[in-house]
Amino acid sequence: MRIAVIGGGASGLYGAIALKKKHPEAELFVYEKEEKIARKLYATGNGHCNLLNAAVVAEDFNNPAFIAPYLKRYPFAALKQTLASWGIMTLREGDYVYPLSYNAGTYVGFLTDLATSLGVHFFTGVRVLDYSQKDGGFVLKTDAKTASMDFAFDKIVFASGGLSTPKLGSDGSLFPLLAKRGYSLVQPLPGLAPIKVAHPEMLKGLSGYRHDAKVSLLSKEGKLLYTERGEVLFKEDGLSGIVVFNVESVYCRLRQPVGATISLDFFPDETRETLAEELKNNHAINPLFYGEAYFPKEVQDHFTWAKNSDHFLLLAQRLKNDGYLIKATYGFDHSQVTVGGVSITSLKPSLESIKEPGVYFLGEVLDLDGFCGGFNLTWALLSALIVRDSL
């Protein structure tokens, strides 16, 4: 059996290793258009490679009903055990799981060496241009200068990623090919990215400031669409930080609803009334500088600090609901994962194509994305195991 894996990122490496371990007699080739394998993986987890999340549940993804049966088959413990069976040791920080080396580059090297030791062949710097069906299998057309790199294959596995972080190789260049071959594509959008606000002048003096807050995404009508608590980073034109990235992904999953706003509750552990009373009492103690108990001086101009009893409730309301109209998201250059891709309606439960038996899909090329915290690399491994089980 000959198998072609298109894409040498995380899902491609996982898929190649899993398939070669199950089918040691198979000839397996990985085609990667970049000269370097898994360039994007080097940047994950701030260079430490957050490869799993111990608390993973279906609701961490955009299509929970689709992924839930797979997570039941392969919960966190099973995924961790799979890596251990490959010789990959891990360490855990809270729910975040990293390779024991705590180094993404070392992890990529290990995966590449493991795949090579199993007999996987890598063609780097080779772009797949098209493929055709022939004699019950497939023939790849590439831009390789050596004709021998164009082989006939029994199976094709697409692990070509999305559009996020194109400078690291994810440019979505195979989406047009897949669309031409009749696959339904959900419009790719940049997920896990900062948000731009409609009136950046409202953020004057806040750039670089960080604060814990409950962040809520609201519709134009004020309906709560999503909420999460975490550290917010203010930028000159918008908001960033892991919690904002997750809110932004939900915004993109909802197809960027017009008029949506993002609201910050700087003191989520207090009600508006208790916060107002606290502000009033602290003002009575230190009327000239009570605001410094809440924010640095350079940040205080963002709020109008109350000076009499009529205004403390209004100030508390602002601190509990600091709202911004969303203008746009940052682009794919600042995005960690693609929201959208090949529709899951195009696939069998085995991740095999409905219309082209023998063609499979892994990882980010699909319309399946997760939040920050190792969920997308969890899906990369999980999808590799699903295809392995069925092939």
Image (cartoon, rainbow, N blue to C red):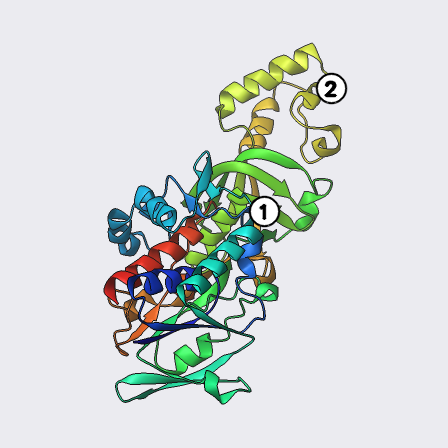
Task: Give the secondary structure at mark 2.
Answer: loop
The mark nearer the N terminus, 1 or 2, is: 1
Q: Nearer the viewer, residue 178 or 101?
A: 101
Q: Position of residue 81 (x, y in %)?
A: 33, 45
Residue toward you, 179 or 226:
179
Considering only vertical position in the picture, is 256 above or below 356? Answer: above
Residue at point 25%, 61% (across, down): 389
**Quarter occupied by residue 180:** bottom left
Asked whether, in this view, residue 76 is left or right of residue 117, the answer is left
Left or right, residue 340 beside residue 49: left
Q: Position of residue 96 (x, y in %)?
A: 46, 40
Which residue bears the numbered disc 2? 289
**Residue 219, above or below 306:** below
Q: Is residue 212 something that shows in the picture?
A: yes
Q: Quick one: which residue is furthest to the top in this view?
A: 285
Task: Residue 46: give its label.
Answer: 1
Residue drawn at 27 percent across, 53 percent down: 70
- Amino acid type at circle 1 is Asn
In the image: residue 16, left or right of residue 207: left
Can see residue 256?
no
Give the image location of residue 249, x and y in percent. 47, 53
Q: Residue at x 49, y 60 (%)?
A: 112
Label 2 is placed on what type of residue? Phe
